[in-house]
Image (cartoon, grey):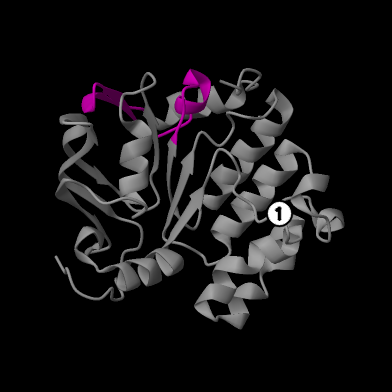
Amino acid sequence: MRNAAPGSSAVRGRIEVQGLGRDYRDGKQALTVLDGIDLTIRPREFVAITGPSGSGKSTLLGLMAGLDRPSRGSVSIDETVITSLDEDRLSAFRGRHIGFVFQSFQLIPTLTAIENVRVPAEILGDAALAARAPALLERMGLSERAAHYPSQLSGGEMQRVALARASVTRPAVLLADEPTGNLDSAAGERVLELLLEAQADSTLVLVTHNPELAARAEREICMRHGRIERIIERARDARAEAGSQRLGSLVS
């Protein structure tokens, strides 16, 4: 397992979490929000992380994304121990290998939809990846909204722009925090369909409160009090049955 610079790997999108924990200080008291997490996610797997509010699921997702530092333990993606990288190398690795979809979209308000999609590729200085932006917006059904600013878009449209932005670098890992939580049922269903399409290229891990959405995953990681309470493995036929039902209650 490398803890140096990220390198190429024949298998893309494998996530290894070992002994992961995260503590926060509340005055003089330490608050443990995540403890003793051991988890392996296979390349191109679709995993849902569920649990009540305060169970640590969003904290776990943020640590897997390299958006936060753990108090103990490690996270590895394709043999690179991202928790051992310095800030510059972690930022470079994250920009190239990890896509993140925020519940609150996090679009830049002064940029148009297509400019927002291009941002990760432009940070990398990769013109070829930036050139994917029009095709991604077309795939999201947003070609006619490319020149619109976030304030001119609906919630569902903003989430699709955010998904296109997270996908523009062809990341090995795509992480999503409550991606349908702020959307109505029709917009949420469309975003889910697009996330499942993205799984063809990326490992997909999402946090959700919604049981119907979680039922679409190959595995459901159920969390409580900062620990993994149980893991539900789903057979392919069970996932297909869940997928055939209309997801009318996607909104949490």
Label 1: element kind: loop
Question: The C terminus lies in which quarter of the figure?
Answer: top right
Q: Is residue 223 shown to the viewer in this render?
A: yes
Q: Is residue 124 above or below residue 179?
A: below
**Image x and y of residue 28, in percent:** 16, 31
Vertical order, 83 against 19 (above or below): below
**Left or right: residue 149 compared with residue 73:** right
What range of the chain is rendered magenta? Answer: 207-234
Q: Look at mark 1 in the image and give the residue it sits on.
A: 109
- Whether residue 41 sits left or right of residue 195 in the image: it is left
Q: Looking at the picture, does residue 99 appear above or below residue 236?
A: below
| Disc 1 residue type (three-letter) | Pro
- Which residue is situated farthest in the front direction here? 27
Residue depicted at x 83% and y 55%: 148
The N terminus - image quarter: bottom left
Residue 41 image offset from top left, x and y in percent:
29, 46
The answer to whether residue 208 is magenta is yes
**Res. 218 image quadrant:** top left
65 inside magenta stretch: no
User: Could you tell me which residue is drawn at 36 percent across and 42 percent down?
Assistant: 61
Residue sitting at x 53%, y 74%: 123
Q: Nearer the viewer, residue 37 or 135?
A: 37
Place of residue 249 in the rendered image (x, y in percent of width and height, measured from the top left): 62, 18
Q: Position of residue 181 (x, y in %)?
A: 58, 28
Of residues 48 and 98, the one drawn nearer to the viewer in this rendering = 98
Q: Is residue 137 left or right of residue 175?
A: right
Whether residue 10 is visible here, answered yes or no, is no
The quarter of the picture where residue 31 lies is top left
User: Dot 1, how many residues are within 10 Å of its Cα: few (below 14), some (14-19), or many (20+)?
Assistant: few
